[in-house]
Amino acid sequence: MIKGRRLHWAWIVLAVCFFNVFINYSIRLGYSLVLPEMINDLGISRTDSGTIYNAYLIIYVTLAPLAGILTDRIGARKVIAACSLILACGSGLMGTADNLLGACIFFGLAGLGSTGMWTPIVTVVQRWFSIRRRGMALGILSVGFGLGYANMGLVFPWIVNNFSWRYSWYFLGAGALIMVAANGLLLRSDPDSSGYRPWGEENPIEVIPMENPEHGSFLTPAWAFRQSAFWFIGLSYLFIAYAVYGFGTFLIDFARHQLGWSLEHSSFLATISGIGQVAGVLIILPLSDYIGRKKTLLLAHFVITCILAAVLLAGDTRLVIYALVGLMSFFMGAVFPLYGASAGDYFPKHMMATIMGVWTPFYGLGAVMVHWFTGILRDTQGNYIHAFILCAVSAFMAFLLMLPVKKPKY
């Protein structure tokens, strides 16, 4: 760090990224809270509601690799600032939707904005912190999506009772709009160009020539795509996304219409889930700095598998469901940041954002499939039993696929 600067800019970058994640995941995860009210107001089916979410996800996963490539080439600040503006427009327009097509278009626009709200953000945070501090930094960052979901669980019933579900989208769009200015003014794409070293780095940065094979800097993404670790991690990402989104998106509707809970009791599940995620990322992600990402992911996948099975056996006992959702969220919240950190751990840092971007379609395929499959199963069978069984099986597949992962030699 340049002399005379007391506050390392890494912490300003982390703070700005934290609020980006808070807003983005309030929008993405908040959809599950708004969903029951949208179903009633717009007269759509559960399959239709899955189609709306898939419009978001298809745009997101299709263009996320491009966001990763652009982050490596033109810098994270430009990508994140532009995407936060698009996110603000899409989420704000969701409040005006009055039919299935309009909701799909507007949430798809939000999905386009969301492409800059994960891969570029995780990349820029990892670049500003040393490798032994990345788990800690990503843990702090990931508190944002847990708090976003918890906040929506508390605020959404108040919005519905005093206004309507549409105003939740207006408020979220306004929040994303504020972040456009914050991103443009305060974000820095990397420490080197700003006169800093990564925070927590004990020794000065060594200038590594691109042709030095010892550090892997001569390698290209094409090399990474030939490594078994790339495919095992990517497929594991697919299956855990299926499990987590299948349960998370339809959890409130499950409680509301299958268990017969009130809006307040159902929405409180989001608050419990958000608090569980906050606790999990603050404990599990720093722990992964010491025991490794692979072991941490294996533990998380195994616990998620067991809890998904337990939810189906718990009946409608509210306290038991609350406890299971809280415990699952403790591990679930850390899963996606751990995959992001794995890109930096298993592959050279100069291709980190590209690897994360190319992994995103794996994640997206799992999420897209589960929204349609779960919606169809719920509409045809009248319950979520078989849909949640598939989620549990998928979580176990994610566990099995991580077992053979080894770091490529370079």
Image (cartoon, helix red, strand yellow):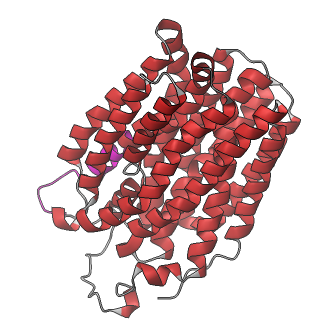
Where does the image place residue 292, in percent across and percent down from the top left?
58, 68
Q: Is residue 11 visible?
A: no
Where does the image place residue 59, in percent across and percent down from the top left?
46, 49
- The quadrant in which the N terminus is found is bottom left
The image quarter containing residue 207 is bottom left
Where does the image place residue 148, in percent across and percent down from the top left?
48, 34
Q: Nearer the viewer, residue 76 or 111?
A: 111
Give the tally of numbered discs: 0
Is residue 85 on the magenta stretch? Answer: no
Q: Residue at x 40, y 32 (%)?
A: 91
Q: Nearer the viewer, residue 180 or 130?
A: 180
Residue furthest to the top in view is 162
Q: Is residue 326 visible?
A: yes
Considering only vertical position in the picture, is 402 above or below 94?
Answer: below
Left or right: 205 as drawn, with respect to 406: left
Q: Residue at x 83, y 25 (%)?
A: 316
Where does the image place residue 281, in percent across and percent down from the top left?
54, 48
Q: What's the magenta region? A: 1-19
Left or right: 372 as drawn, with respect to 76: right
Q: Residue at x 56, y 25 (%)?
A: 34
Q: Residue at x 59, y 77 (%)?
A: 229
Considering only vertical position in the picture, is 148 above or below 403?
Answer: above
Q: Nearer the viewer, residue 290 or 268?
A: 268
Left or right: 353 as drawn, with respect to 160: left
